[in-house]
Image (tube, rainbow, N blue to C red):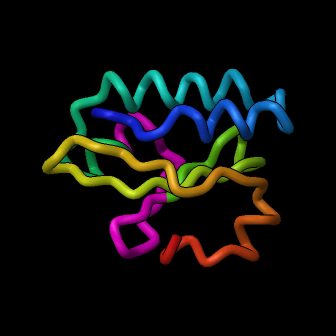
Amino acid sequence: MHVISYKRIREFVKDHPDSSVKLGRWYKWMKKGKFKNLNDITRKFSGVDYIGNDRYVFNISGNRYRLVARINFKAHRIYIRYIGTHTNYNNTDCKNI
């Protein structure tokens, strides 16, 4: 899959360096993945949920952080829409970002 854009991960890691390993691992797995639907993703990531509007939320670092991505399975593209703390996630309308 093509992940757009790694820049969001780099920017988030600057302020949250403890997330570097887990976000880096997520990026590598998604980039190498051949996911066709949510079931394919949940085989690799147990901490992922569909939140509507083609958005999926991934729990990162034991649910300390959240990554929201818009996934187009047909085009094999993943658009990172949001990365934040669990607290900030609760205050963000991630279905529409």
Front in this rendered view, residue 13 or 50: 13
Q: Is residue 95 left or right of residue 12?
A: left
Q: How many numbered discs, if any?
A: 0
Front in this rendered view, residue 43 or 5: 5
Rendered residue at 24%/39% (across/down): 35
Rendered residue at 36%/27% (across/down): 31
Q: Which quadrant does the N terminus fall into? A: top left
Highlighted magenta segment, given as a residue range: 42-56
Residue 84 forms part of the magenta stretch? no
- Where 9 sits versus 87, above or below? above
Estimate the x, y position of residue 70 in percent, counting from the top left.
39, 57
Location of residue 60 (image quadrant): top right
- Where 15 sits versus 38, above or below? above
Estimate the x, y position of residue 40 in percent, counting from the top left.
27, 42
Estimate the x, y position of residue 63 in percent, counting from the top left.
71, 49
Location of residue 12 (image quadrant): top right
- Where 17 sits versus 48, above or below? above
Q: From this viewpoint, which residue is outermost toward the left?
A: 74
Estimate the x, y position of residue 86 in percent, counting from the top left.
76, 59
Residue 54 forms part of the magenta stretch? yes
Q: Is residue 34 left or right of residue 92?
A: left
- Where 78 sits versus 34, above or below? below
Rendered residue at 21%/50% (across/down): 73
Rendered residue at 72%/42% (across/down): 62
Q: Is residue 6 left or right of residue 87?
A: left
